[in-house]
Amino acid sequence: MKKNIAYKTALSAILCALALSLGFLESLIPPIPLLPPGAKPGLSNIITMFAAGSIGLAQAIMIVVVKGCFAFVTRGFTAGIMSLSGGIFSAVVMYFLLKYSGKIFGLIGISVLSALAHNIGQLFAAVFITGTASIAYYAPALAVFGIATGAITGVIFKAVIPALDKLKQHFFI
Amino acid sequence: MKKTAIAAVIIVAAVFVAFLAYDGAVNKEYSSDFFVMNTYATAKLTGSKSKEAADEIRSLTETLDKGILSRTSENSVVSLLNVNGAGDAEKISDYLEILFDVCRKSGGAFDFTLGAVSDLWSFGSNPKLPDDSAIREALSHTGYEKLKLTENELVFGDKSAVIDFGAAGKGIALDEIKAVLFEKKIKQAVVSVGGSVLLMGDKEFTVGIRNPEGNSGSYIAKLHIPEGCVSTSGSYEQQFEANGRKYHHILDPETGYPVDNGLLSVTIISQSGILSDALSTACFVLGYEKGKALAEAYDCGVVFVADDKKIYAENGAENFIEITDDAYTLVMQ
Amino acid sequence: MNIKFIKKGDIAVIGVIILIAAAFMLWSNSKSEAVQAVITVDGEVIETVDLGSVKEKITVIPATSPRVVITAENGKIRFESAECEDKLCVACGDLSKHGDTAVCLPSKTVITVTGSDVDAVVY
């Protein structure tokens, strides 16, 4: 395991790059009317999920931290904190679900719950930043939206697992 | 790997708890409301010293009123100046300079030397229609040009002139309050002194423009604005009826009578409290065209509400406004 | 990763989330319908009236000078009479909507209907 540390670092870097590019790609989608503000499909969660499921929690958290730092630098304090808070919480949830709940939930369920965790983390940060709990009233709308996005990322995840696994094999992990 | 995972979980949990504790300490919300300067004030503050700051705001506005601005307390700076017709104005000289500037730029539509005239109307207690001759006599002693401020010394050219900060006092209070909020490192604040509002913090605030026909909590339009000060002068305030006519408290310095130009209210958005307050009165007196130009000269957003239920938002205010009452229409230029 | 694509648990969890979200929405809606009026004298709350549940006429007379009489009925609250000079508070009329406010300066009495959706109103 120890020997592989260089490989692991390299793989993590590639996954980070993938997560950031997906995040950027997503930012190109124009805001969708009727949806709660800040609602996004969360494509980069696919990468986090892969890291959480097939490498480890530490790697998954590293990816979301890098994403958070990136948001911090490019979109400011508020976006940074929201991204970090949502990302870390969902990475932890993902990790434990993937590890222990394989008998109960499928990929779709885990993906939906992770999206939900992401929303909860973000809402928590938003309450923290604005100092008002009234934002929590967005929670139901975000939760329903989370089901949709979670399902979408779940489907995409299923489709890209072979490719990501292949990528992983190059690094002998 | 397992150890790393456990460590990561513990770190995340610790961060979470620290987050909660920090949040509780830093984002303490505190609301208070009190009566000061002959009006009603509210403060909603967020910060680690929010209660301290609210208490200080309260005592500060009380001393500002009693010690400086009040016409009814005998030893206030303003009262002493009025009695002596001259004197040390160091405590208010910065504000006086701003007010002189507003007087000049508004061509006298704003004038803080109207004290003798507004006393005749006795707004604030039991307003009544004064004798026309009394108004004319009082008017002969008004005029900001008769006063001179040199190195903190204010001298009245006419000893019978009476200065009155009624049209700027709430704004001055907001500026003083702002200094307290900075000192106490308040993160977010909404302070209202008699309907003049100070907004502070990194967010978009929503401020309602009072419904001229409703109570003081009902509004006809919303302004979505970042931090700053907002003041309104409205003809619906302190209205009374005499001889079958309605009179309000915004006096035209030219005639000594309430302004009658079809406006119901003027709202000014500014970074300065005193400017927002003084300009709202000045622009009300000037009316739409000239008022708009004055607000522009000070780079302030302005909203005019006219009695034909038309709303004019100018100098950037058009980007912030949202009409919420169907009876009113926004006129786009 | 050999996790199945979709399992019964997924559908169950999605159902539960939708149920909770719907329940929360209903709850928050019903909560915002409860209109409360708070009466304060010199900044101290002396009475809270749930306007939604007021059936019979309620009269509140705070210990103030000058004396004011506040009445609530049919989801509305108002300054019924006041012994001050200008009676501006009485002129405010009925308060029933979120954020409605009437202030009586001489007696330092304020009636506020809670739940304004603006940070402040300028007047």
Image: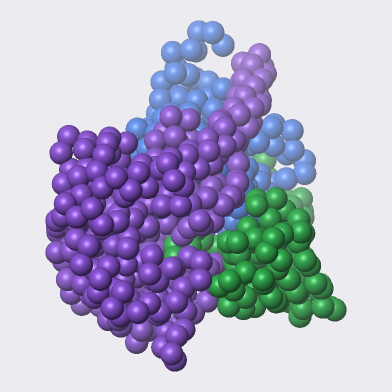
Chain colours: A blue, B purple, C green
Point out the residue furthest to the top here: A3
Q: Is residue B240 left or right of residue B330?
A: right
The x, y position of residue B8, in whole percent, is 61, 20
Residue positioned 51% across, 57% down in the render: B39
Residue B309 seen in the figure: yes
Height in image: B107 above or below B262?
above
Residue positioned 29% across, 62% down in the render: B114
Height in image: B15 above or below A75?
above
Residue B27 seen in the figure: no
Q: How many numbered badges does the structure rendering display? A: 0
The x, y position of residue B299, in whole percent, is 20, 55
Height in image: B83 above or below C98?
above
Residue B89 placement: quadrant: top left
Q: Is residue C13 left or right of residue B3?
A: right
Residue positioned 48% across, 12% down in the render: A5
Q: Quarter of the image for the N terminus of chain B: give it.
A: top right
Residue positioned 14% across, 64% down in the render: B107
Q: Is residue A26 left or right of residue C20?
A: left
